Image: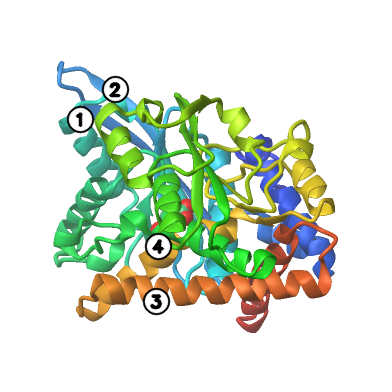
Amino acid sequence: MSLDFSGAPYEKDPVYMMAVEQLKEAAQILGLSDDVVEVLRHPERLLQVKIPVKLDNGKIAVFIGWRSQHNSALGPYKGGIRYHPNVSVGEVVALSMWMTWKNALAGIPYGGGKGGIKVDPHKLSPRELEELSRKYFASISRMVGENVDIPAPDVYTDPQTMAWFFDEYSKIVGYPAWGVVTAKPFQIGGLKVRVISTGYGVALVAREAAKKVFGGLEGRTVAVQGFGNVGRYAAFYLAQWGARVVAVSDSKGGIYNPNGLDVEKVMKVKNKTRAVINYEDAKRISNEELLELDVDILVPAAIEDVITEKNADKVKAKIISEGANGPTTPEADEKLAKKGVVVIPDILANAGGVTMSWIEWCHDRMGCWLTEEEALDRLDKKMSENFNLVFSEWEKKYSDKPMRIAAYVIAVSRVVDAMKLRGWL
Ligand code: GLU
């Protein structure tokens, strides 16, 4: 007899349903039975909290938030907390499941978790935002801890939010609990390089893929969609390592110069004017045109579902490194695999953030501060190894399919093995 979960609040959410489909595909290849899939598709724990905030105008606004702890077979739950008006319980649960696979694939000692508050943080004053953050963390405090569940930033949360979380939790437990959140400001146990680490990792796996496809990165052309912390540092490092970044974009549009862009200059323009289109020495292009440029490497680092069945045939890049979560739809992924394009899946390509979180967590728990070089070296080694493992499995067993399949199969099997060894299955 199994419990009937059909009424679970996340069951009908489209993002959650997609996550379950991906799990089922990997489970089929691994020969996992339906009851094992049933175990894997639900979070171990899911907490919903009410967060009343006293606004500056004296009124009280009530917000809703969640923390989903999907799986802890490989270690404490780990994953970010997002603040966004569209956050839903289904999205949070799906994202927590993706964190389980991402962390398992990254080879770091964590399970998967994710949290979120349904709020538009831009509409709150700094004081209101601090109250919201502290109250949320106090409400989930019994569920988190350096050995239990370790949150981090996600969409619209940042090191300042982590500082409030860290402080609130430390007050509750009565000691400075450095290891309870990661991506903290460097003055209180964080690492300066954490902010660049997701983009650095996206560039790093593209560099490893370029060795396989072209024999190296030197002179290869690159287009990057999105110029936030992921896109800008991916562009920066790819340029540093010898590639020619010819196009970048943000939500206001893109720029293209076949002779190459000066990435550092684009970063300055973006910081000053909040739009890359104000960079002078380039032609303006749309976000859609950027995806179809004749380049060797494409980095979609903005939003989900940008490479679809409609434009997949027009994509000319030979390597795609997914900085964003879910930029390629499953149909497009199949089409690109048939064309021989190497699509480095999000759970592999954008794991630099959480991998650096792990490095920060180790350094906090030992109380031995690492230098920036040491931290980046560790990230480089870990991610190169992971990329090469997934790539060789893919080449050996699934080369007619998307590389994502190989990544999922490795991740799910690691989690299932741990569950079996622990006697959970
Ligand atoms: N939110 C990031 C992710 O989705 C980072 C998570 C973390 O560092 O724990 O990978």
Residue 264, horizontal then vertical, whole percent? 32, 46
Q: Is residue 13 left or right of residue 199?
A: right
Measure the alpha-carbon separation of dots 2 and 1.
Answer: 9 Å
Q: Which class describes the residues within 10 Å of circle 1: few (<14), some (14-19), or many (20+)?
A: some
Indicate which disc, 4 or 3, sits on the residue closer to the N terminus.
Answer: 4
Mark nearer the viewer, 4 or 3? 3
Q: Amino acid at mark 2?
A: Lys
User: Which residue is drawn at the image coordinates 26% and 70% (left, top)?
Assistant: 372
Camera-nearest residue between 185 and 244: 244
Q: Which residue is mark 2?
A: 123
Measure the alpha-carbon separation of dots 4 and 3.
Answer: 23 Å
Indicate which disc, 3 or 2, sits on the residue closer to the N terminus.
Answer: 2
User: Which residue is drawn at the image coordinates 56% and 25% (left, top)?
Assistant: 286
Image mark for residue 378: 3
Indicate which disc, 1 or 4, sits on the residue closer to the N terminus.
Answer: 1
Q: Tags 2 and 1 in contact by the CB under 8 Å rule?
A: no
Q: Tags 4 and 3 in contact by the CB under 8 Å rule?
A: no
